[in-house]
Image (tube, helix red, strand yellow):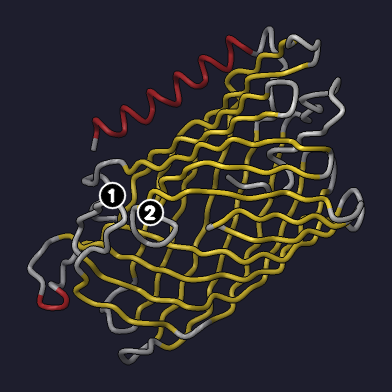
Amino acid sequence: MKLKLSFSLLCIFLAASCLNTEAQNTNLSAFTIKSNYTGILNSSLVDTTGKYGSNSFEAAFEIPLYKHFFKNSENKTGFWDVSFQNNDAISSLNIDFLNRDIRLLNIGFGLRGLYFTGNKNCWLTRLNFSYQGDEHNIGLSTPRFSGTLLFNRIVNRGFTYHLGLAYRYSFGIASVLPVAGIKYQITEKWKLFLSVPFYTSIQYKVNNRLLLSAKIHPSGTMSYFSNNDKLFGCSQNTLMFRKRATTFSLDAKYKINSFLSVNGDIGREGSRKIYFSDIRTEINKEPHNYFTSAIRSAWFINIGFIIKLDKKRNPSPNNDEFIDYSDDGFEY
């Protein structure tokens, strides 16, 4: 536990050192702080008696490490951009047949990178390591890796497409998945986002301060769970708790001023299941399940805020096309 904590602190220290070095001579992206609360109402388990519900609180920050502008052969401006990211969450799960509530912790850190050629091509990548478990075993687990690599092509001002690969746990198991999608400006106020297999979203820009959107996407979690009560006739000390769902939400984001925004979502989770499994995590392979149950659909709410301590400028002011890769819901 001490070694892992020391490693995490070392990463943060190196990130801060790079920030201090580069801040003197580069125009950095904004230092960003995010926080969210999500509550999912209790609903009945289908395959056994009892109900399931959850509450979670998440806090994250992003530290810009390096940004370098350059001129390409056509005298257009391109850039490199690298940021350090940290994401921490605590979730309280209510499962009636257990003798205690489950409190799951997530501590994650990684790097986000972007390379824009100055013309129409953009490469995006994200590497993340996380510790996931309950309060009894969070320090015993090995860090879990996830990552994404995307090629983004800016066809014109209103249309881009992306192709790539992702290694994630969005479906409750470790999966390597091909990714393909588009971002299409339907009208001045309407925009369509599509990224298969992760999400579909349509956005309406009410004005310069308020954005409304509707979104559907799969969700999945995996976390270590201490089997202190020797549940399901299993003698293992640690099990894997997993959940899968399909989420539909109506979202609103309001920009109060140049550095503070608030957001709120209301939606419904469907096609839900929970699993208690062994701790094997082979890629694209379902582990052995000691217990599984479907859950009836339920409503949820999400509220949060975003603070940007420095306003971002247009990263490619000398180009005909406009690239908005991080502030409009384009997740990768």
Q: Is 329 rendered above or below residue 245? A: above
Q: Residue at x 87, y 50 (%)?
A: 209
Question: Pointer 1: residues within 10 angstroms few (<14), some, or many (20+)?
Answer: many
Locate residue 193: give its quadrant.
Answer: bottom right
> Which amino acid is tagged 1?
Ile
- Mark 1 or mark 2: which comes first in sequence? 2
* Residue placed most toward the observer, 176 or 53: 176
Which numbered marker is on residue 112? none
Q: Is residue 275 above or below residue 79?
A: below
On the image, the x and y values in percent for residue 124 come to 58, 33
Mark 1 falls on what kind of element? loop
Name the residue rendered at 31%, 56% in the picture. Answer: 284
The residue lying at 38 percent from left, 54 percent from top is: 105
Image location (x, y in percent) of residue 57: 52, 57
Picture coordinates of residue 301, whole percent (x, y): 62, 70
Q: Which residue is mark 1?
A: 138
Determine the CA span between mark 1 and mark 2: 7 Å
Between 257 and 215, the one nearer to me in the picture: 215
Q: Residue furthest left?
A: 235
Residue sitting farthest toward the bottom: 49
Residue 42: % across, % down: 48, 82
Contact (CB < 8 A) between labels 1 and 2? yes
Q: Callout 2: few (<14), some (14-19), or many (20+) C-alpha neighbours within 10 Å?
A: many
Q: Locate the C terminus and report the quarter of the image it occupies.
A: top right
Residue 64 found in image quarter: top right
Q: Is residue 116 shown above or below 322?
A: above
Q: Which residue is mark 2?
A: 105
User: Given the image, on which type of amino acid does mark 2 rest?
Assistant: Leu
Residue at 24% x, 52% y: name it: 282
Q: Is residue 311 left or right of residue 197?
A: right
Nearer-the-camera pick, 299 or 13: 299
Instruction: Left or right? Give the position of 41 relative to 249.
Output: left
